[in-house]
Image: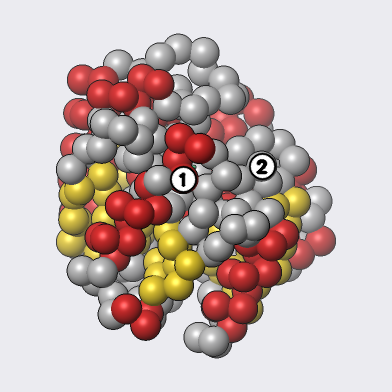
Amino acid sequence: MLKFSHAIVRTPSQSMLEGITTGMFSKEQPVYEDALVQHANYVKALEELGVKVTALEPLEEYPDSCFVEDPAVVMAEFAIVTDSPKESRNGEKYEMKKVLKDFYKEDQIFYIEAPGTMEGGDVMLVDKHFYVGLSDRTNQEGAKQFDQIVRQFGYTSSTVSVTEGLHLKDFVIYLENNNMLVSPVMNKVEDFQKYKRYVVEAEELYAINSLYINGTVLVPEGHPKTQAHIESLGYPVKVVNTDEFKKIDGSLTCLSLRF
Ligand code: CIR
């Protein structure tokens, strides 16, 4: 069973008001002070689940830099620095590389390189297999380079088309123990038929991106049906409010790198 001892987060910058958004979840701008409080509570929730959290300083030049899940994919054995096709996010990889050097040896750090593109929100691990979403942020070449890296460590990967919005993990998430939360579209994906799937209805779509941590599931506040389902599966649940991040398409997994 997946066990996390560490997490990396980055405190949001004031510039998050200019973060990229599809408007998929909200048309409003985040309120910075509220985002800081929500971020601190998210960190506290991780700590309460036995995770040692490294909190990085805000980066004003990168509005979306609190979404640390995107510039890297981290495992106990290796880390992959990704390559965002979004100009305002691409520079985050240089900052992330510096941070990862505190946790990994040089030969444990790998890179997705142009013309490959990737963001970590498109990468979902199930046991020793990665599902990689092909999206506006992650392309086939990025997925190919990723596959070559992870195979060296005994993992496999395959791709899934993301047709509904930003990242793969906005539409499907794995909660361990064979349990998945899915959108109606992801529910039909052939590769996912072997898992026990719960289809999250449209009005609770944001709650697909719940976060399994060491036996407990963090669920975003305000999604009672999905929460009740997760509880019925036997998981202890911790509810966290990430409404300010939701306004710029940010959900629970994207706020941390866990390993
Ligand atoms: C973006 O569009 O890049 C950010 N505003 C949101 C990133 C969310 N990341 C994630 O779900 N992994």
Q: Residue at x 28, y 80 (%)?
A: 105
Residue 225 % position (x, y): 53, 34
Residue 100 % position (x, y): 29, 65
**Element type where label 1 sits in the image:** helix
Quadrant of image for the N terminus? bottom left
**Among all residues in the image, which is located at the extreme top?**
28
Q: Amino acid at mark 1?
A: Asn
The residue that label 2 is drawn on is: 136
> Which image quarter: residue 257?
bottom left
Q: Residue at x 49, y 58 (%)?
A: 82
Residue 213 circle label: none
**Element type where label 2 sits in the image:** loop
Residue 24 seen in this snapshot? yes
**Position of 88 compared to 63: left or right?**
right
Residue 195 % position (x, y): 67, 64
**Among all residues in the image, which is located at the extreme front?**
114
Judge the density around disc 1: few (<14), some (14-19), many (≥20) Cα neighbours within 10 Å.
Answer: some
Judging depth in this view, the residue of 173 and 13 nearest the camera is: 13
Q: Which of label 2 and label 1 is nearer to you?
A: 1
Judging depth in this view, the residue of 19 and 220 nearest the camera is: 19
Judging depth in this view, the residue of 247 and 215 nearest the camera is: 247
Labels 2 and 1 touching (C-beta < 8 A): no
Spatial CA span between label 2 and label 1: 14 Å
Does the beta carbon at disc 2 come under 8 Å from ligand 1?
no
Residue 5 seen in this snapshot? no
The total of numbered circles placed on residues is: 2
Tell me: residue 244, above or below residue 147. Answer: above
Tell me: residue 257, above or below residue 105. Answer: above
Residue 90 circle label: 1
Q: Amino acid at mark 2?
A: Asp
